[in-house]
Amino acid sequence: MYQLIDFKTKQTVTTDDFVFAGEDTPWEVKMDLEKIKRRINLDYFTQAAPCLSKYLPLMPIQEPANFVSLRESATPLVRSKVIGKALGIDLYFKVEGKNPTGSFKDRGSAVDITLAKEMGAKGIVLASTGNMAASCSCYAAAAKMPCFIIVPEGVSMSKLAQVISFGGKIIQVKGSYNDAADLAYKIAKSKKFFLAGDYAFRVEGQKTAAFEIIDQMLFQVPDEVVVPVGCGTNLTAYRKGFEEYQALGLIEKNPRLVGVQATGADTLERAFSNNEKEIKPLKSANTSATAIAVPYPIDGDKALDAIYQSGGEAVSVSDTEMLSAQYELSTQEGLFVENASAATVAYLFKKHKAGKLPQGKKVVCVLSGEGLKDPSVVLKAAIQPPIIYPNEADFDKLYNNNFFDNKTMVFIEQNEVIFASVPTVQEVKDKLIELFEAKYDDDFIVKVHQSIRHFLGKGKSITVSDLQDIVQDAREMVDHGAKDALKVISFKVATAKDGIAEAEVTVERDGQLYFASDEGVGPVDAIIKALTKACPGEVSYKLTDYKVQIRGQGADAVVYVELKMLKSGLPSVGKAISPDIIQASVEAFIDAYNIRR
Ligand SMILES: *Cc1c(COP(=O)(O)O)cnc(C)c1O
């Protein structure tokens, strides 16, 4: 029913283990389409709705009853409501995040794991950047087979959580995806495990997405299909799917395939722009889109070949362009997708901006994964939502100050320095409009300006993310009505060799000076204890919570401190930011103390 061939030599290959790839070249499955054509009913094919049983004869599975399926496939093909019109094209989205584990990988895993079971492998091993792991561990659980997963350190926590829930045996390695893939290959060979992942059989499952697009478009072929590229396997699968439909006589032409990478992992684009047939590996990948952070795409040459054959192109987009496209997809189309998936739409925006997007074409963007797969990327670009006391007055303060007119995310390099020296108030105002589309009142801008001066005075230049924090802070620290109840006149902390810290503070309350000192396990502990001591008497507090967040990168990152105390039995929360943790703690303490409820 099928043959395994080497991608480079096109010779038939065989193996006596469960590794379906050469050491250096990928293999591919060649289906006997003539035989299949005789077996299937083409009338039925053009009429039946897209579903798995329809495509089973086109998959290399011996016994349909063995098929490990979890209702992957038949994902929606959604016509764009807004973006297509804005770009002047007839745009569709193939929403692959609707598969069982949230990415298209499930189509391939269904075939991979079914074959592992049919062939009698005792276990499964694979390398992954996250989604492959989530998908394979899910299908392995369904097939009741042990599944070993090698991931590079630092993959998305939500993807790890999926793997762990499915009982996948996960190992993180210090290295890139490619290091993980090398290790998985070795383990599969020596332990006789089935090597799942971006190898020959996966394509046979993933190609069903191409079948579906044609079925869902009622056998009209789109002009262009845009696919995000990591290892290049999925783009290869689309090409194979369209070619097989053409060979079966179901369509007359193939769509143009566009492969989109991240600029920090742009192997295909580099080869394509030099008209080369082979990709050159990069040392490392540099992008926040983990699903396509691949320095050496295993199927890179295959994908490149598919692109050339289809008259398509290989392109790349920046992380910021992806994020911005992700936001447009969510806000304009109601589609929350992974940033790697948004790369496809980012490419369209980029091309349109350059005036090079042909008008009126039918284009399908493959939205490869679900947005909840990697929320950290969104949260990093987000303007943190404010936290207020549950009363309407606090809400009104935000509402009346135009807080909700802001964007909810910013798409600029977060570490870009915007103020290295003290700006004018007008400059601050202009920057706020430029970055957040925010038009604040003048009092507020003066407050932000003061903070900026304070930061710069501490030798900290202001980056985009710092400004974001400062604005938020100024916003949250709206007057509590009793600003002056407690003032810290001076403070001092010293840490001894044994780690014990000693703090001294002088505070002013209601015109009276108080002095106190105390020891703590660290400088923060000591200063807060001393402050607590300096505010004795009729108010009693208990420190119940203390939270620190380092925002930004590097030694001069901003520290955000949130401090909860019980004041006269009522909880009160203070917040502050500063480049200095002690300073931030002191200010958070004052903030919490001065809140009048
Ligand atoms: C795996 C993956 C990709 C990249 O696909 P390749 O087959 O590796 O090229 C893109 N987007 C998402 C969401 C993925 O999970």
Image (cartoon, grey):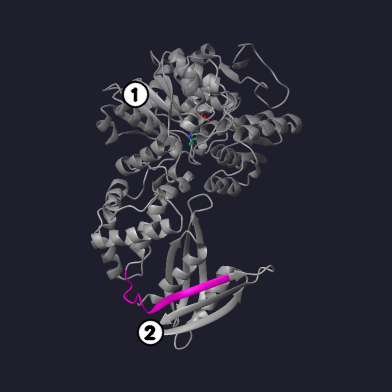
Quarter holding residue 97:
top left
The span picked out in magenta is 479-493
Placement of 289 over or under 478, stated as above or below: above
Q: Label 1 CB, ligand 1: below 8 Å?
A: no
Residue at image position (38%, 29%) is 347
Spatial CA distance of label 2 from label 1 is 81 Å
Identify the image quadrant of the C terminus. bottom left
Q: Amino acid at mark 2?
A: Gly
Q: How many marks?
A: 2
Q: Position of residue 291 (x, y in %)?
A: 51, 36
**Which residue corresponds to mark 2?**
511
Q: Secondary structure at mark 1?
A: loop
Residue at image position (56%, 71%) is 493
Q: Is residue 284 magenta?
A: no
Residue at image position (36%, 66%) is 477
Q: Position of residue 536 (x, y in %)?
A: 48, 85
Circle 1 crowding by C-alpha within 10 Å: few under 14, some 14–19, many from 20: few
Q: Amino acid at mark 1?
A: Leu
Disc 2 to disc 1: CB gap under 8 Å = no
Can residue 217 be seen here? The reply is: no
Quarter holding residue 65:
top right
Residue at image position (36%, 20%) is 221
Quarter holding residue 198:
top right
Residue nearer the viewer, 272 or 249: 272
Can residue 212 be seen here? The reply is: yes
Q: Position of residue 90 (x, y in %)?
A: 28, 27
